[in-house]
Amino acid sequence: MSNLETPTRVNPDEITPIAVTVGISARHVHLSRDHVETLFGTGHELKPFKELSQPGQFAAEEMVTVVGPKGVIEKVRVLGPERKKSQVELSISDCFKLGIKAPLRDSGDLAGSSSVTLVGPAGSVTLPEGAIIAARHIHMHTSDAEKYGLVDGDRIYVRAKGPRGIIFGDVLVRVGNAHKLEMHVDTDEGNAVGLRNGDTVYAYKIHGHISELVK
Ligand SMILES: [Zn+2]
């Protein structure tokens, strides 16, 4: 075996992990001011229903129906506050049901993403783009990021233990003063590993793509 073919192994147990709580993100919609009014009526304000773990974010009472070329998903929760652009976050399973091929994206990166129609009690809107499968990520306060030597936009590995345990690669790190330490995965990813809301996973400060973990 040449040097190039020698496996490079990283033993996660030799590295001190960062314990992170998991939040499973069910499908949801973020709406712009315009679209809140189109779907729920002129002057309508989203009504907070439940605070989310990330500071300032809330699940609203409002729900919409998401319509694709092959199917419909009802009662999709709207999350607040409003955003500059509407964004629909779906799982791959949801996309099969709707008949769309939404791209895997970091939140907010919507250029060229999928079109869907949203229907509310006061009207409907077809987004020319805005439906994505959100890339798994870890929210991290600036002080945590400094402590761990990570910066916004880093991609790291995260280990989920258990009978269907797995090491997630390419976990985006999102840093800011309005972020609280928590990993977000979608329902497909959570179910595949048997993760539940509030479980603990272990993040490693190993940068890079999963294919680089074992060469
Ligand atoms: Zn998140």
Image (cartoon, rainbow, N blue to C red):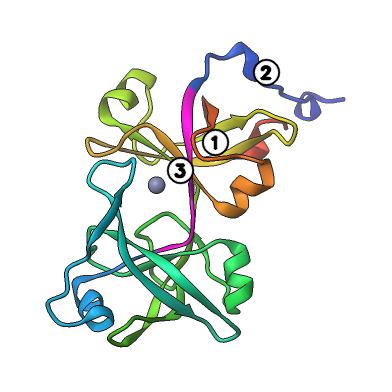
The residue where tag 3 is placed is 137
Per the model, the C-alpha gap separating discs 2 and 1 is 15 Å
Q: Quadrant of residue 38?
A: bottom left
Q: Is residue 25 left or right of residue 15?
A: left
- x%, y% of residue 168? 60, 38
First of labels 3, 2 by sequence position: 2
First of labels 2, 1 by sequence position: 2
Residue situated in front as seen by the camera: 115 or 81 = 81
- Above-or-below relation of 79 to 157: below
Asked if the magenta segment contains residue 24, the reply would be yes
The residue where tag 2 is placed is 11
Quadrant of the frame with the C terminus: top right
As helix, strand or loop, the secondary structure at mark 1 comes to loop
What residue is at 58 percent from the left and 71 percent from the top? Answer: 95
Tag 3: amino acid:
His
Numbered tag placed on residue 159 in the rendering:
none
Label total for image:
3
Numbered tag placed on residue 208 in the rendering:
1
Q: Is residue 5 left or right of residue 50?
A: right
As helix, strand or loop, the secondary structure at mark 3 comes to strand
What residue is at 79 percent from the left and 24 percent from the top? Answer: 6
First of labels 1, 3 by sequence position: 3
